[in-house]
Amino acid sequence: MRLTYWPRENALRFAFDSQPCRVARTVEGIGVLDLGEHGRLLGIEISAAPGLDLQRALQAWHDRLWTGGWLSLGAGSAYLRLAPERVAQASRQARSVQVRLALELDEQGRLLALVLPRRGEGYELSSPSGGT
């Protein structure tokens, strides 16, 4: 997985492949961002957007990331872990905030990237420390 910062959109983009792919459509969704001490990104829960088959969209990610347990698929949501489990559990000041997400899909409805705004209601991801 590749993480990039898009200054024009002021957003973080989590892409499965490092090679650019053609985005066929973008679906707006909601999720829950888990933050640890000093604003460390712990994980993102992705809720299924109306009309989106989340299982199908994330299947390629799930198949390739499952060995490390980084992605868990549920019936109506998925959880993408961004920090090792031991780090997440050791975080004493963890908090969760609801976030808007943009899910970039290819022509087959597979997720190419997940875009998270750097700033939203109740949170702001800062740099370089990552504080919120």
Image (spheres, grey):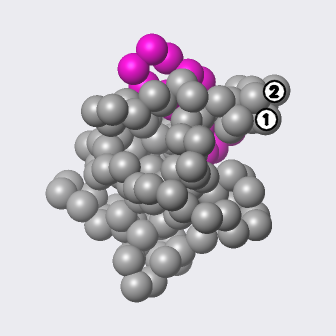
Q: Is residue 45 above or below residue 13?
A: above
Residue positioned 20% across, 55% down in the render: 122
Residue 89 in the image, given as x and y percentages of width and height: 56, 30
Q: Amino acid at mark 1?
A: Arg
Q: Secondary structure at mark 1?
A: helix
Which residue is situated farthest in the front direction here? 107
**75 vs 117: above or below:** above
* Residue 12: percent from left, percent from top: 48, 66
For disc 2, the neighbor class at 10 Å (few under 14, some 14 to 19, many from 20) is few
Left or right of residue 112: residue 19: right
Q: Give the residues drawn in magenta, as a range.
A: 72-85
Residue 26 lies left or right of residue 122; in this view the side is right
Q: List the residue tagged with mark 1.
A: 64
| Picture quadrant of residue 18 | bottom right
Q: Residue at x 68, y 52 (%)?
A: 16
Look at mark 2 in the image and give the residue it sits on.
Answer: 67
Q: Residue furthest left?
A: 121
SS at mark 2 in the image: helix
Is residue 83 in the magenta section?
yes
Q: Residue at x 45, y 28 (%)?
A: 53
Q: Is residue 106 left or right of residue 68?
A: left
User: Which label sits on residue 29?
Assistant: none
Q: Is residue 17 left or right of residue 96?
A: right
Q: Image quarter for residue 61?
A: top right
Amino acid type of disc 2? Answer: Thr
Spatial CA distance of label 2 from label 1 is 7 Å
**Camera-side residue: 90 or 48?**
48
Name the residue furthest bottom.
8
Residue 86, image x, y percentages = 67, 32
Instruction: Work out whether 9 lies above or below 36.
Output: below
